Image (cartoon, rainbow, N blue to C red):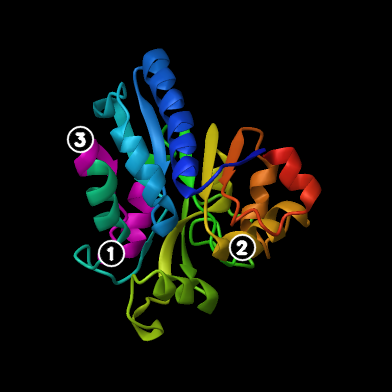
C-alpha cells in the first residue's frame, strides 16, 4: 500500500484521477476492456469531476459496478447511489455497461444476480472511500473480513448514518435507511488495483485508526494495508492526525 498526501482536496482529486486514467487506458489497450468498481459520497466529488474531464479513455469499453446501495431508497432520492453514479459518472462519460444495485427491488435477487456478474471476470480497478467510522463500502465496524460472498446485506451503524446526515444527503437521522447492500471486504480486495480517495478533516481519526494501528475489523479500511496495489490519497486535513514521521514519509 502507498499513501500520498496532496496539497489540497482539488489536487488530491486530480492526482487520483490521473492514476485511475492511466490504469484505465492501459487496461483497455492491453485487454480491450476494463472492469471497475465506483464509490459514491461527498468524498468522491473532486475525483469523479477530474476523472470524467480527462481525455483518451474509451468509456464504451468500461464495465462498472458500484460498492453499495441503501435498501428501500428509490433511485429518485438525492442519496441514491444509483442516482449519484448516473449524474456524476455514467451520463458524463457514456458508459453503457453498468450493473446497478436496486435496493428498492427484490434485494436477495439483486445481490445474487449482480454478484454473479461481478465475479464473472477480474476487476481491474476499484475506486473507494473511507468512512468517518473507518468503514469500507458499507462494511461498518466490526466488519466481516471472512465472507466470500461478493455482496452482502448489512446493518448500518449510527456513526455511518449520522455521516450521511452531516453530508446533507438526508435531513435527519430518522430518514437514513438502517440497512444496505454492500460489496464484501474480501471482494473489494480482489481488485487488481485499489484507489482510495480520502479528503477532509472529518476523516482524520479514521485515517489514523486504519493506517497507524492494527489491521482490525473495528477499523475496516485498515485491511487495505494487506493489498499490494493500493494507493490512498489524502489531503493535509485527512492526514493531520498521522504521526509527523508518517506524514513526512508519505508527503
Name the residue furthest bottom.
Answer: 174
| Front-lying residue, 58 or 240 | 240
Q: Which residue is mark 1?
A: 106
- Percent position of residue 88, x then y: 27, 48
The mark that comes first in sequence, 2 or 3, is: 3
Estimate how packed mark 2 is, as few (under 14), some (14 to 19) or many (20 or more) residues with alpha carbons within 10 Å: many
Circle nearer the viewer, 2 or 3:
3
- Marking on residue 229: none
In-image side of 128 versus 189 (left or right): left
| Front-lying residue, 153 or 156 | 156
Above or below, comparing residue 39 to residue 131 in the picture: above
Estimate how packed mark 3 is, as few (under 14), some (14 to 19) or many (20 or more) residues with alpha carbons within 10 Å: some
Q: Secondary structure at mark 2?
A: loop
- Percent position of residue 5, x then y: 61, 43
**Residue at 53% across, 58% down:** 200
89 falls in the magenta region:
no
Find the magenta span and give its range.
91-115
Calculate the distance from the C-alpha at mark 2 to the C-alpha at mark 1: 24 Å
Above or below, comparing residue 121 to residue 195 in the picture: above
**Residue at 65% across, 56% down:** 207
Q: Which residue is mark 2?
A: 143
**Residue at 33% across, 70% down:** 169
Calculate the distance from the C-alpha at mark 3 to the C-alpha at mark 1: 27 Å
Above or below, comparing residue 55 to residue 224 in the picture: above
Residue 96 occupies which quadrant of the picture? top left
In which quadrant is the C terminus drawn? top right
Q: Secondary structure at mark 1?
A: loop
Label 3–label 1 contact, CB within 8 A: no
In which quadrant is the N terminus drawn? top right
Q: Which residue is mark 3?
A: 94
Amino acid at each position: 500500500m502507498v499513501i500520498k498526501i496532496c496539497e489540497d482536496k482539488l489536487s488530491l482529486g486530480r492526482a487520483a484521477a490521473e492514476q485511475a486514467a492511466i490504469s484505465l487506458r492501459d487496461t483497455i489497450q492491453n485487454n480491450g476492456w476494463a472492469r471497475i468498481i465506483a464509490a459514491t459520497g461527498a468524498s468522491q466529488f473532486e475525483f469523479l469531476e477530474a476523472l470524467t474531464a480527462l481525455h483518451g479513455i474509451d468509456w464504451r469499453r468500461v464495465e462498472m459496478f458500484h460498492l453499495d446501495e441503501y435498501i428501500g431508497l428509490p433511485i429518485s432520492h438525492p442519496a441514491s447511489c444509483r442516482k449519484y453514479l448516473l449524474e456524476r459518472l455514467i451520463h458524463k462519460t457514456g458508459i453503457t455497461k453498468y450493473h446497478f444495485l436496486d435496493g428498492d427491488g427484490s434485494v436477495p435477487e439483486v445481490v445474487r444476480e449482480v454478484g454473479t456478474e461481478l465475479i464473472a471476470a477480474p476487476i481491474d480497478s476499484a475506486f473507494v472511500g473511507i468512512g468517518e467510522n473507518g468503514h469500507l463500502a458499507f462494511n461498518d465496524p466490526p466488519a466481516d473480513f471472512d465472507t466470500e460472498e461478493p455482496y452482502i446485506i448489512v446493518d448500518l451503524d449510527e456513526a455511518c448514518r449520522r455521516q450521511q446526515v452531516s453530508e446533507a444527503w438526508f435531513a435527519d437521522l430518522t430518514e437514513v435507511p438502517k440497512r444496505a447492500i454492500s460489496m464484501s471486504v474480501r471482494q473489494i480486495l480482489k481488485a487488481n488495483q485499489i484507489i482510495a480517495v480520502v479528503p477532509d478533516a472529518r476523516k482524520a481519526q479514521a485515517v489514523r485508526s486504519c493506517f497507524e494501528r492494527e489491521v482490525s475489523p473495528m477499523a475496516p479500511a485498515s485491511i487495505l494495508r494487506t493489498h499490494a496495489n493500493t494507493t490512498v490519497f489524502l489531503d493535509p486535513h485527512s492526514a493531520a492526525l498521522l504521526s509527523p514521521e508518517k506524514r513526512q514519509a508519505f508527503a
